[in-house]
Amino acid sequence: MTLPDDKTLLLVDDDKPFLTRLARAMETRGFDVRIADTVADGVAEVTRQAPAFAVVDLRLSDGNGLDVIEVLHARRPEARVVVLTGYGNIATAVTAVKLGAIDYLAKPADADAVYGALLSEKHDRTALPENPMSADRVRWEHIQRVYELCNRNVSETARRLNMHRRTLQRILAKRAPK
């Protein structure tokens, strides 16, 4: 896969550590990366200069990432957009594709998966992962994400996950499953 002449890439995600890691990884792959961590910042970046590529998280602190995709495709219909989310469901995937997204990846997605999705041809089929995450690992990743979104507040995380606080504390104290 080779990059086209226009290598501009906009990354929109409110998970700052993930955003920073992905930005660095995509820069090493040849992209000219700009970042935004809110819908408002994402729309402002698109309005300033619509990128050729975008990776957009659906749930952002100030709204829905679909708003960024909609503005981007109004300004640059040929832009290639990949949607990332930790809360995947069929309805949002369909809406994202209708608005012009070319792929929909569940978090945590690595830079190789994002790069492959951005540069894939329309007729390419996504290969099944050779070593998919176990159900225990997916559960653990989800709990960790909600815990971080709750600013590492155990009581709030337990309430949102509808589980007992002590049970959550035991899960958080353990190592990540393989």
Image (cartoon, rainbow, N blue to C red):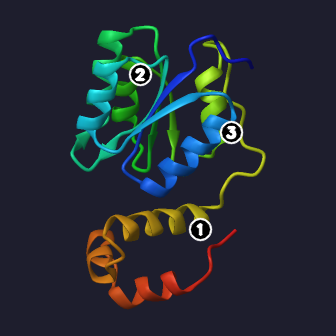
| Residue 148 spot, x, y in % from top left | 39, 68
Residue toward you, 91 or 111: 111
Q: Amino acid at mark 1?
A: Asp
Seen from this angle, which residue lies furthest right? 130
Q: How many marks?
A: 3
Badge 2 density bin: few <14, some 14–19, many ≥20, Cα 10 Å: some
Name the residue at 57% across, 50% down: 21
Q: Amino acid at mark 2?
A: Val
Q: CA distance from mark 3 to mark 1?
A: 23 Å
Residue toward you, 93 or 39: 39
Badge 3 density bin: few <14, some 14–19, many ≥20, Cα 10 Å: few
Name the residue at 56% across, 13% down: 6
The mark closer to the camera, 3 or 2, is: 3
| Residue 117 spot, x, y in % from top left | 61, 28
| Residue 136, numbered label | 1
Q: CA distance from mark 3 to mark 2?
A: 21 Å
**Label 2's element?**
helix
**Label 3's element?**
helix
Q: Which residue is mark 2?
A: 97
- The first of marks 3 and 1 along the sequence is 3
Badge 1 density bin: few <14, some 14–19, many ≥20, Cα 10 Å: few
Q: Amino acid at mark 3?
A: Asp
- The reply to whether callout 3 and callout 1 are in contact (CB within 8 Å) is no
| Residue 112, numbered label | 3
